[in-house]
Image (cartoon, coloured by chain):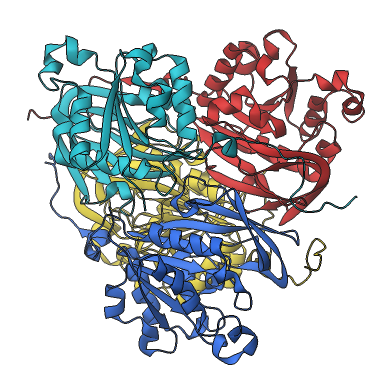
Chain colours: A cyan, B red, C blue, D yellow
């Protein structure tokens, strides 16, 4: 039904360049680790990073993007508001968005959710177990009942997001917390998926199950069955319709 | 279970003062028409309007407000962003918010929804019939299967909002449209209800069923069972929790 | 991602054989009209009807069915409970189910919903307009904001079903009603879609938009990405797990 | 807004009479332990048990019941289908239903859910932590971010229920599982809440937080604002409406 989605993998790409501990895990950037398995699955993938002009997210790039994945952490505040406006509009017009890990605090995710997107966190390398609670959802395709991440950063409730349209994963942590770690949303004509695993100092994005989930999310948020260029935004924005569709009798 | 909620009825209050056609329907302002039946039901009600200092929504007023109702139309852009920030934070901390009619395009509603909140509209005074599709929801209490508004402004789909947590009303219009006219949301610790009927040139806010619904919405969004002052926002915002709740064994 | 789903189109197939008025519209049965455009889209389609042994829904047929579509009207009570049990189990194990029009009162739909599935109806051939309220949902793929059915049977609220996991269509009727005419559900590992248009005396199943929607529903409910044979039901049924996944310390 | 709900606390009441280990925890039955704090909160409470005529759930008793709580475990199969029919109809007509712990496998809960309601379980007395994920829901009123149950029976995912209309609690278990332990549903005119804690050999129903939650659930599922006797079921069941509400013009 769908043609192959064109993916743009966005990354803040700062601390991989400045912190040896992080560079040693993701030597050419987290975006490279995220992009590789998507390319191997046959998707058309480009990358973009914060320090490129317009953060690499020009009108042209976005017009050629069916799915955008987002990874940011330390420099959320440096993302320009006009670029956030642009990405938000594209999502409402039909572009898919996958928000990863610390992207929960990105401007674009907070903008689209309308809440603080706050959570609790802890960084002691404890064990995480990701449980599937919506087994019929495409994002869970190919998974068993759960998978484990041996060492993780804990993300815990309360997670201040709208109740997801579909809750797909709930995480268990050794230290005693739970977290709604896989949340599906529909906004305008676009789909959004938030997936919590993945930390800059841990090799989580090399783990098979995590790569499978990210591939699934990209396929699910892609505007399946719609033309590659979504219908003009005037369609969804509505507006004045002075003539009724049916005759209206005088009162 | 709940104490009586303290309500602040907010109104833009511009065109009632400048347009005779509107003044004749709402001579002392739409806020007065909305506030009256709430007071008669025993609620504690104050009003606030755009042209008051801080739009009448000072920190003190909001701290004493359990439920805020919002009516705006022509001057959404004049509401200051810092006041929108303040109201949003209060909602996330537990204050109820009732958004009425053209308030769908207010800054505060768009901020909390994350979408354009666009719709189609038509102003020819056609008939509207409001159908109850969630009969067990408190907002539908006391209503039959539907009620009618003899002359209305049409608001039609597509309505670019997140799918409501509960859809309570669906409107039928003589001219051929439908509209999700009663939408319940939960955001942070706060509840939000959008209710579409009500137009500045039509006496809709004097209609018994409409007044009953607004009273129901105020009661539903009120922080029932919570202390009058919601818990501090640090609770829901989460944060760093360096110590695990359970012992974490070395790997 | 998915292989082509194998579809079984089920039909009560009674009144097409006995009532001339109905035979003239669907001379070889409603199932034939539903199956034809699915075949033309490249799907593997078989049909089954009430008066076949086991209603045509043997263990073998169901084991080879990824998606079952259901049309019944006058003889719901004649469907054997053991066959209903079998279909329900298959849906919970991952088979997709598309319930059409008067199938709202079928045993299988009522079983899966847990409610009466009642509605109001009227058969005077009035106009219907089907509005899309979830434009990003795959079932709405290729549609505009709405489509019209020139002569229809009215189905109206209150519709006694659980709130759909996603509400995709809302119908407008000339006679004054609205109806949630496109409802998506997930139950166990299976997806279910209820689509209201289609009446035995009206040529609705020959209309292009209706055929497109049914094709979309079949594709959406198909167990995308899962193996053709869903995982064994023991997986989802859970059971006793005497050994903890993590060490439990004595209290 | 609401009058005090009349509650019927139903219990299977078998193993408290036959197993010393259970009798020692709940000497006069689990129903007594559940009823006591409800009475102390001022509610009107009666109890009913399996071995009474009609299981204590006569037409008269149900007609005088606003909220029914359900505890069963070993004898689900002994509940007569005609009583299940009766209770289901009352829920669809507006009576609230609170299903506790092993009641997940009761006929009435499975009937109303339409799924197997299966889960995994383990009985080694491990620790449970109940997290609030919907802080604005009335069922969470008065709770903090979480509460702990020192020794519990584990109930784990996959839990084969429809996605709740609102997910209120997610449980963490020491042994490595998570569970959607607080699930709110609306069916027909009735509200249903499933709450997982509570085991026959453990004093969980004497714990303050558990008692508070059960009180909250009873208040939430009560038909707030509706007359004590819900409207007749013909209202929600719909039916034939031969005359249109609006004039229908000839085609």
- Residue C65: image quadrant is bottom left
Q: Residue at x 47, y 19 (%)?
A: B232
Q: Height in image: C16 above or below A121?
A: below
List x then y, in percent, for residue C159.
60, 62
Q: Answer above or below: position of C3 versus A30.
A: below
Q: Residue furthest left?
A: B251
What residue sits 61% from the left and 40% below the top? B159
Q: Is residue A151 visible?
A: no
Residue B30, picture quadrant: top right
Looking at the rendered image, the quarter that the C terminus of chain B falls into is top left
Extreme residue in the top direction: B53
The quarter of the picture where residue C6 lies is bottom left
Q: Is residue A52 visible?
A: yes
Residue at the limit of the structure toward the bottom, as seen here: C18
Percent from the top left, x then y, of residue D112? Answer: 46, 63
Q: Looking at the picture, does residue C151 appear above or below residue C79?
A: above
Name the residue nearer the viewer: D212 or C180.
C180
Image quarter where the N terminus of chain B lies is top right
Seen at 45% across and 66% down, the residue is C98
Expressed as whole percent of the image width and height from the top left, the position of residue A123 reads: 20, 22
Q: Is residue B176 left or right of residue A180?
A: right
Depth check, front residue: C35 or A151: C35
Q: Is residue A155 left or right of residue B201?
A: left
On the image, the x and y values in percent for residue A32 come to 19, 26
Q: How many marks?
A: 0
């Amino acid at each position: 039904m769908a043609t192959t989605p064109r993916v743009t993998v966005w990354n803040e790409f700062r601390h991989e360049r400045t912190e040896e501990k992080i560079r040693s895990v993701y030597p050419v950037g987290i975006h490279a680790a995220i992009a590789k398995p998507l390319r191997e699955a046959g998707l058309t993938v480009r990358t973009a990073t914060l320090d490129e002009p317009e953060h690499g997210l020009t009108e042209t790039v976005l017009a050629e993007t069916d799915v955008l994945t987002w990874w940011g952490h330390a420099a959320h505040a440096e993302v320009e508001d006009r670029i956030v406006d642009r990405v938000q509009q594209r999502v409402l017009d039909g572009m898919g968005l996958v928000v990863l890990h610390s992207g929960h605090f990105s401007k674009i995710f907070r903008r689209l959710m309308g809440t603080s997107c706050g959570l609790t966190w802890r960084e002691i390398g404890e064990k995480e177990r990701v449980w599937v609670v919506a087994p019929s959802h495409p994002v869970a395709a190919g998974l068993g009942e759960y998978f484990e991440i041996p060492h993780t950063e804990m993300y815990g409730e309360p997670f201040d997001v709208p109740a997801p349209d579909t809750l797909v994963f709930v995480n268990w942590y050794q230290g005693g917390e739970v977290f709604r770690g896989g949340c599906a949303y529909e906004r305008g004509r676009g789909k959004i998926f938030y997936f919590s695993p993945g930390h800059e100092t841990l090799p989580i994005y090399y783990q098979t199950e995590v790569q499978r989930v990210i591939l699934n999310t990209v396929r699910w948020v892609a505007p399946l069955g719609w033309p590659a260029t979504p219908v003009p935004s005037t369609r969804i924005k509505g507006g004045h319709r002075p003539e009724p569709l049916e005759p209206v009798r005088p009162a």
